Amino acid sequence: MSKPRNTKLATTLLAALFLALAGCRSELQNTPDPYGDGYTPVGGAGSQHPLPSASTQPAPLERRTPLDRPELARVVTPRPGSPRLKPLGIPNGAPTRVKLKLLVIAATEDESGLSALKTFLPQIGVPFDTLIATQTDLTAQTLEAEPGLGNYNGVILTTAGLSYYDGSAWASALDASEWSLLRQYEADYRVREVQYFSFPDGAGTGMSWNSVASGTPNTMTLTADGRSVFGYLKVNAQIPLKDTYTYFGTPVGNAKPLLTTPEGTVAATTSWPDGRESLSMTMAHNYYLTHSSVLTYGLVRWVSRGVFLGEKKMYFSAHIDDYFLPNDTWDVNLKRNNLSFRLRPTDLQSTASWQTSFRTRFPTFAGFKFELFYNGLGFTPQAASNCNPAANSIDPLTSKSKCLKSNFYWGNHTYTHLFITNPAGPGPYTTFPPDPNNPGQPEDSFSLSRMNYELGDNIKIAGPTGLNLSANDFDAGTLVTGSHSGIGYYDYEGPEDNVGGPPDIPAAKINEGKSKSNPNLVTAMNTNAIRYLGANTSAPTTAPLCTSSAADCNQNNPSPNAGVWLTGPNLPQNSVLLVPRYPVNIFYNVDTIAREVDEYNHIFASFWAQYGRTTPLTWDEILTLESDAALMRIISGSMNPHYFHQINLRFENGSSLLTAFVDAVGQKYNAMFDLPIQNLKMTRIGDRMRPHGLRRRWCASHLESHDWDGHRDRQQRRPDSPDQPHTWHSVRTGSRRIGNQRSDPDCRHGTLR
């Protein structure tokens, strides 16, 4: 029997309360994009602006004053009973199996904890069903596929009592018989339960309440039992607890504390007389909160007894665009670009030395290397390799690059950094830089020969007569176009519209969609065997900047760690995969802290004014915001690289803007995690994104069930299902060790703790 839908639930007090407590910031998603990825070349060079986006917005430093305490402490009255439920059909003593899927139960659709779980579980790859208990009854058919086969191997309650405000009183979204059925299922099938946010009432959580709720920032540490649940964290990890409400409890009975603060316990496991086991947490969650992202993987491991479909790996890659070319520089007085800067050989030497030091200081980043995306126009073939920055050379940067080439990965960024638009577009537009081989060619012609020159001749720079790069450090099948241009994201005002122009921010580009990619570029990519093309996660997918469908405009991952296939009339299906890249608010035209801070505050002053901030942000505050955002992407398991520009590597007082950023990310990650970082060049990222998306689609289409009896797993395909293009392994032999965790990305594999 379906429960009547309560259309007022979205505005109930509890819903508003959870959003306030967990620090909802939906208003940040609509912050205007000040740059639109505009391109402003100087002296033959060009670059792009990193964009603020939904995933890179600066978060407010000052939160609203929180409520005195959450309403979870109110007395909850049982909901009136539904018709008697059919009991589970397990004969006494009969063996049981459970499908490898989780059940998430929430009282209402708009709970912040539900939003968090809907974000984090797909990142891990864990199959799950969601039951909104105020709308749908919990029945035996929900929990049991057939006698002895349970539908779920773990249950997560968004709140311990599933309480909600029905307009007149606080009530539980499950009635007494549904609670009884759930408890029976958990006991009979040995299925564990996580209470994602709970009030420590002593009776159902294993903790008694010992202080008032607090919204004050705090720090959690692991107990000995906590280290077995969250084994991917360092023994002495300091887990931040901020921008959320927290209760502090005292363990009672046989409860085992997992996470503690100076004020009390905030997570504990409890065993019950009927054999059930539960894990309760006493802090609110949301999808953008660090503690939620850090801890949810451990909850999945615990609730599933370490056997689940999915994986957890951590990735971090940093791309540096426009190598060999100069970038514009921001003028703090004029509030616009003025002059330019090209990397010095001493900067490259300092970067290589810093990179070695970084790997030593942070062992989890042991294999870290920057990936330099170069433009051959700035390369000087005649310059001899020379490791001495003071030596005479026709081009000292080329000489130093030849000397230090093995310290970095390398990638194709087109020969001239051509800004590619769509000849069939509305115009007007210009071709910049001009074609060196055809100086008389009309500016508005993006010929096929020009495209082949941009791609193919730049590949030759990596060859024996150029940098002479090894196959390990360079792959000719990868490409990042200038300003991510040519794939539907266009600025028809032209790339030169802000050179020496007024001190304002250029207009945003228009996203016409991937189907409007430049046809000659598409043909040239096919001719030059390009398999992976860098994309921009901040490309707008909504009006007015998106003029096609949201799906066609999208350059972001369609699902976690899946790439985006480029489509076009001259392109074979599934031949070029877009690899989304994250922009960072360390801008393409800044080389010093003073310029970065000035431009950041010039752009975001009105944004911060919404939150009462009237003074400029400092470099330390900007660095904290940007490194926190990057850390959250790492914790999410995203493979997407972050991208920067060669100007950001200018060394000043022992560091550069970019190395300071990576240092901050490394410090924060290394302080919490034991899992080694996977630092992949773009080719390897694309190689993993390509089958990752195919696997997920195959699983959704063809895999009917996958169950576990406590010893081995079994998978059942739909009758018309073709073979999945990956080898089948058992859970025990199919997983592999990453750090102290076992992981396997195949959708039919389990992960054994």
Image (cartoon, helix red, strand yellow):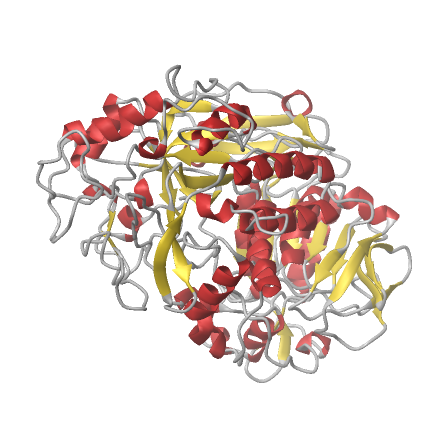
Is residue 453 visible from the viewing direction of this image? yes
- Which residue appears farthest toward the top when viewing the image? 464
Q: Is residue 341 above or below residue 167?
A: above
Q: Out of 376 and 585, give the one closest to the viewer.
A: 376
Q: Is residue 546 above or below residue 388?
A: below
Q: Is residue 243 left or right of residue 529?
A: right
Question: Which quarter of the picture shows residue 7?
Answer: bottom left
Name the quarter where the C terminus is drawn: top right
Q: Is residue 589 left or right of residue 377?
A: right
Measured from the top left, where is residue 288 in percent x and y? 56, 59
Q: Is residue 152 above or below residue 200?
A: above
Residue at the image point whose x is 25% and y is 36% from the top: 567
Q: Out of 119 and 339, give the one closest to the viewer.
A: 339
- Which residue appears farthest toward the front when viewing the image? 392
Is residue 689 visible from the viewing direction of this image? no
Measured from the top left, where is residue 240 in percent x and y? 71, 59
Residue at the image point whose x is 12% and y is 53% from the top: 427
Measured from the top left, where is residue 160 in percent x and y? 70, 63
- Which residue appears farthest toward the right when viewing the image? 253
State the count of labels. Answer: 0
Question: Which quarter of the picture shows residue 454?
Answer: top left
Residue at the image point whose x is 69% and y is 74% from the top: 72
Measured from the top left, where is residue 619 in percent x and y? 58, 63
Q: Out of 343 and 323, give the one closest to the viewer.
A: 343
Q: Is residue 102 left or right of residue 588?
A: right
